[in-house]
Amino acid sequence: MEKKSYINKNIYDISFSMRRERARKIRNILLFLFLFLFSLNAILAYLIKPVKQSSLSMEPNISRNSFSLATPRALFSDNRIRRGEIVLISRPEKKSATFLQNVADVFFRVLTFRKFSKESPFLSRIVAIPGDTIYMKNFVLYVTPQGEHFSYTEFELNQIPYSIDIRVPPPNWDTLIGVHGDFEKMTLGADEYFVLADNRLSSMDSRMFGAVKKSRIKGKVILTYFPFKEFRFFRSKVRK
């Protein structure tokens, strides 16, 4: 009677217990990967958000192609938005999405905790808050806080030190196009924030699209981490 040979057999073909152990290890690895990606997406959605600055608008404080970390507005200390803070602002809402776009959005939210959108939020700086009366002269903002009678420059009131790029425009600069360096007095409403880019000549900010509602302010920048030579924290100064 011919004997069966197991020499060329795979050990998993003849051992049920080892096959079961292998399957258990594979399940554990897949579960670990799923939980890791799930946790990472949750952290990026609710705790911190990496932001790439792809334009020159926030120079000289945040350079082009640098990376920063922003924290959602819900995690702000006392939920206040302060003058001088660099914030993450959502784009204006467009027309209603199609059925397929809504379906894609649902799947995208489940997997990433974020809304499916081709237009990402952008960075700008809070320079005036609700109730402020403001005007601009030579690209510098002047602010009269609600209930006061004197105007201050934006730098006297800011709660995070910063500098701006206000290089003199070229002689042939057309003041009727692009961003303006001067405008008359205006008073912000109860839910209006005026934002400006630090590069006052190369930017898109409230001079172009007006004051923004609080609901559009999605987060604030807490630090810049790349390039490493530009690593810095953005801390608010407490004002009474």
Image (cartoon, rainbow, N blue to C red):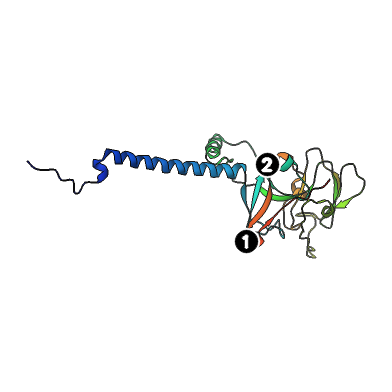
* Label 2 Cα crowd, 10 Å radius (few <14 / some 14-19 / many 20+): some
**Residue 161: which quarter of the image?**
bottom right
Horizontally, residue 74 falls left or right of residue 39, namely right
SS for callout 1? helix
> Where's residue 145, x and y in %?
86, 45
In-front residue for pair 229/208? 229
N-term mark: 2 or 1: 2
The image's mark for residue 28 is: none
> Where's residue 105, x and y in %?
56, 38
The residue pinned by badge 1 equals 228
Which three-letter amino acid code belongs to the residue tagged 1? Phe
Whether the residues at callouts 2 and 1 have beta carbons within 8 Å, the answer is no
| Residue at the extreme right | 149
- Residue 5 seen anywhere in this rendered image of the structure: yes
In-front residue for pair 186/170? 186
Residue name at image x 81 percent, y 41 percent:
130
The residue pinned by badge 2 equals 75
Compared with 141, 102 (above or below) is above
> Where's residue 230, x and y in %?
66, 61
Compared with 207, 166 (above or below) is below
Residue name at image x 76 percent, y 60 percent:
165
Total numbered circles? 2
Residue name at image x 85 percent, y 48 percent:
134
Which three-letter amino acid code belongs to the residue tagged 2? Leu
Residue name at image x 26 percent, y 40 percent:
15
**Residue 116: which quarter of the image?**
top right
Locate the N terminus by quadrant: top left
| Residue at the extreme bottom | 171
In-front residue for pair 46/174? 46
